[in-house]
Image (cartoon, rainbow, N blue to C red):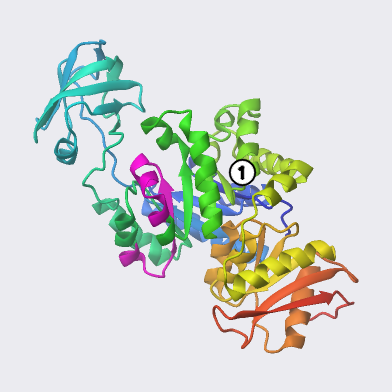
Amino acid sequence: MRRTHLTKIVATLGPASSDSETIERLFNAGTDVFRLNFSHGTHEKIRELHTDIRRLEKRKKRPVAIMMDLQGPKLRIGTFANDFVELADGEHFRLDLLDKPGDSGRVYLPHPEIFQAVTVGTDLLLDDGRIRLRIRESNESFVDTEIVVGGTLSDRKGINVPGVVLPLTPLTAKDRIDLKFGLSLGVDWCALSFVQRPEDVIEARQIIGKQAAVLVKLEKPSAIDRLDGIIELADAVMVARGDLGVEMPAEDVPVLQKHIISTCRKAGIPVVVATQMLDSMVEAPTPTRAEVSDVATAVYDGADAVMLSAETAAGRFPVESVTMMNRIIERVELDPKYRQITDAGRLDPEETVSDAISAAARQIAHTISAVAIITYTTTGSTTLRAARERPEVPIISLTPNSISARRLVIAWGVHSVETQDAENLEEMVRRASFHAVQDGFAKPDDYIVITAGVPFGTPGATNILRIARIEDLKDQS
């Protein structure tokens, strides 16, 4: 099944999409990567979902990527004696370590790390920023605050501490158990929550090793301050706009989105834009015009993938949400302005043989009107360098490595194929031609551009560029 979109779609599975029939419908509608949210659901249910996806993959004979998303630390207040309180602007309110129900003057905050990190003048945001408190006095067991923006505050609402690096690891005890389980299943991507600094990625890498690729969710402004160091360690990045929008001015998020995308593209790693992209489709069969424009902007910006969360996990219209996302992407990618913007943002190749060949492949494909670029790869790095070029034609990635084939599904423009490696130049052309025709990219007399490395099967040895014309093919691969 050939996709006609270049920008990929990530769909979250949940109660609305937890049966095999719906998962297949989501795939048919355009889903490339399935996200398993470990904040919800039992290990038993997640195992069922993983099994259903792998069965789907076998039926469709096409690599499908699975992403596990770790919960990370959840900072929440305790409970109130009457379930909620009303906080008035200008009044005082205390958060402390006293484990008993709160009232209009205080509440339990079971996170001593916050008390250790904050200072007088620090703002605390509760309930996704709806309540704002400013610290007047603090020590290691409580903070006294002034209510800057009040309102109704109920049990166990979340708390954010903008502008402060908290002494917390992104991997809780629950995350470590979940991570061990997810890796045992064989997930392709591991999404890390609550990353604040490069050291957090290193800590996760020590556990994950090479068992899965690491995607860093950028949720904290402190992570943005050290963006280059985090990107250097990550395999991919997610712009988690909802969380970023709580801890920084909302008007800064679109600018930051563009900056993160361009920085990731320069580094040659995939970047996913996420959160509330078609949020109204949780309850409605069509999105708002603003949401359509939001998805389109991410595509114009050059994101590798866009993600649906509640829309497919818990909404009334999960398949319709993916269908709409697919329609938006395809429409934008047909716009001549999209290609103009993409070409204008093209980066100079780095001084490596792989980049020189990738840049040449893009230029040649344009000049001779080739229908596809075919990359032979083992680890996936060659294909990612080709995707960095953002060519006008799809990239068919041929690899004998099922792990690489699945991980590459998330990358812009990549049609991933697991196949045997070539043993010589003649077989290289024959195999590339076969898959280009079989998967619907080419027909006889079309041109394709092929990149590979000699000796064949050697990781990181891309050193060949070949132009080939498709000939009538026999039934061989």
Q: Is residue 123 toward the left or the right of residue 201 in the image?
A: left
Magenta span has 219? yes
Indicate the secondary structure of the residue bearing disc 1. helix
Q: Nearer the viewer, residue 125 or 390?
A: 390
Q: Residue at x 57, y 28 (%)?
A: 280
Magenta span has 252? no
- Quarter of the image for the C terminus: give it: bottom right
Q: State which quadrant residue 109 falls in.
A: top left
Q: Position of residue 456 (x, y in %)?
A: 62, 86
Please indicate, yes or no, whether residue 308 appears anywhere in the rendered image. Answer: no
Q: Residue at x 70, y 51 (%)?
A: 343
Q: Position of residue 70 (x, y in %)?
A: 37, 51
As drawn, 461 above or below 366? below
As drawn, 265 above or below 278? below
Q: Which residue is mark 1?
A: 301
Q: State which quadrant residue 354 falls in.
A: bottom right
Q: Nearer the viewer, residue 336 or 435?
A: 336
Magenta span of residues: 205-230
Q: Residue at x 57, y 73 (%)?
A: 352
Q: State which quadrant residue 474 falls in.
A: bottom right
Q: Position of residue 33 (x, y in %)?
A: 56, 54
Q: Position of residue 120 (x, y in %)?
A: 17, 27
